[in-house]
Structure formats: structure tokens, C-alpha cells
Image (cartoon, rainbow, N blue to C red):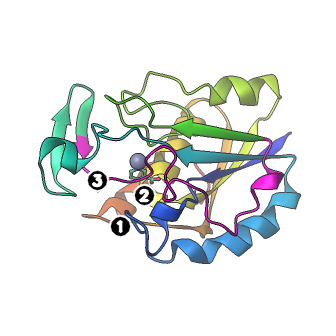
Amino acid sequence: MTHALIVIDVQNDFCPGGALAVAGGNEIVDGINAAMSDYEAVILTQDWHPAGHSSFASTHGAAPMSMMDMPYGPQVLWPDHCIQGSIGAQFHPDLQTDKADLIIRKGYNPAIDSYSAFFENDHSTPTGLEGYLRTRKIDRLTLVGLATDFCVNYSAVDAAKLGFAVQVNMDLCRAIDFDGSLAAATAGMKAAGVTL
Ligand code: VGL
Ligand code: ZN
């Protein structure tokens, strides 16, 4: 088996001081760096939204963390974050990005959010990551990063559905934990066959 480490969204905006800060988001960086050499491939994801993205509360004059029904289903409206080219969208400065074979960006479609590294939130528009992994004969994935209950969760469940052997290293993840989202994500990942 060929085993890849997928590092989800370890970006300034998801770390303390950022626009959508995840508590303790910075605490996982050293551990992720140390883990990189244990894998045959290292892939980073980068949340990468245009200004005025449809997932931003400000775009709709709505309150951050309120819900909106989109054509593809319910969507949390977030504070503006990870805007293309901004400091907030950059990786945490201590993350060892030189070790990455691939950096995959997501959320660039103005009309659809993309929590998962594999599909946009319509669950059908691919990012291309599946093809990359298959052509490199990567069949086993360990996921770490931010946030456990959103982008890590959606990526892990999609990967399991696609037939990859998927593990999430919870020690190297941190959660937003909004409205029971962490408990729901944990249950959903287990139900999908993800090893936690
Ligand atoms: C994420 C909310 C919005 C994440 C990204 O990386 O978990 N969460 N965009
Ligand atoms: Zn986002």
C-alpha cells in the first residue's frame, strides 16, 4: 500500500488571531511537521476563496454562523476567511510546506463552498484530488489539520466513500465545534468506516 498524509487547511485564518480561528489550531503544527517523513507522499490543502464568496455572511448581509439554504443544500455562513492572496490564506508560517508533493486549493468557485478536498459542497464537482491519488497508486490516507468537524470530516468521509483506507489522527486536528458539529462529525466519520 502507498500511504499519504493529507494536511487539511493549516492556514493563518484557522489559527488563533485569524478570521475563523479554531481554538488550539497552532498547537498541531509541530506534530504535523514531525509526521511528514513517515509517509510516502505529503499533500496539503488550502482553503482559497474569492472576495465576496457565497459562503461569507457578509456577502448576504447576514450574521456570521447563521445558516442559508443554497441550491446544493444548507450552508453555514462564515466570517470572511482565506481570501485568495491574503495573509490569512497563507499556511501557518511554521508548517513545513517544502515537504509537500501537492498543494490542492478548494473553495475557489464563487457559488459553491468546498469543505472536502475531493468534492465541492454539491458532493459532485471534483477537485481532481481523487485522480491524482489514483494515478500515483496511493490507496491509504491519514488526515490531519483544521477543522476536525468541517474540512477534515468532509474529506475523510468522501475519501472513505471513494474506497480509500482512511484514518484521521485526532491528536493532530482541532475543531470549530459549533452547535454539536464535532459530535456529529465523529459519528459520521465512524459510520463511513474512517478509523479515528
Ligand atoms: C473550513 C469552514 C469554512 C475548514 C473551511 O477548513 O474546516 N471551515 N471553510
Ligand atoms: Zn472556507
* Mark 2, residue position: 149
> What secondary structure is found at the residue carrying circle 3?
loop
Earlier along the polypeptide chain: callout 1 or callout 2?
A: 2
* Mark 3, residue position: 78
Label 3 C-beta lies within 8 Å of the nearest ligand 1 atom: yes
95 drawn magenta: yes
Query: Is residue 185 left or right of 179 when viewed as pictured?
Result: right
For the residues labelled 3 and 1, the Cα–Cα distance comes to 14 Å
Label 2 C-beta lies within 8 Å of the nearest ligand 1 atom: yes
Earlier along the polypeptide chain: callout 3 or callout 1?
A: 3
Where does residue 43 sit, x and y in percent of width and height? 72, 45
Per the picture, the main secondary structure of the magenta-coloured stretch is: loop
Disc 3 marks a residue whose amino acid type is Trp
* Mark 1, residue position: 177
Disc 2 marks a residue whose amino acid type is Asp
**Nearer to us in this view, 172 or 60:** 60
* Position above or below: 108 against 149: above
Cβ atoms at labels 1 and 2 below 8 Å apart: yes
Q: Is residue 188 visible?
A: yes
For the residues labelled 1 and 2, the Cα–Cα distance comes to 7 Å
Disc 1 marks a residue whose amino acid type is Asp
* Residue 133 figure quarter: top right
Q: Which residue is painted at 42% across and 41% down in the image?
A: 49
Earlier along the polypeptide chain: callout 3 or callout 2?
A: 3
Q: Nearer the viewer, mark 3 or mark 1?
A: 3
Where does residue 61 sit, x and y in percent of width and height? 11, 47
Q: Which segment did they paint magenta?
A: 75-101
Label 3: how many Cα within 10 Å (few below 14, some 14–19, many 20+)? many
Where does residue 90 sit, x and y in percent of width and height? 57, 55
Q: Which residue is painted at 21% across and 49% down in the image?
A: 57
* Residue 26 figure quarter: bottom right
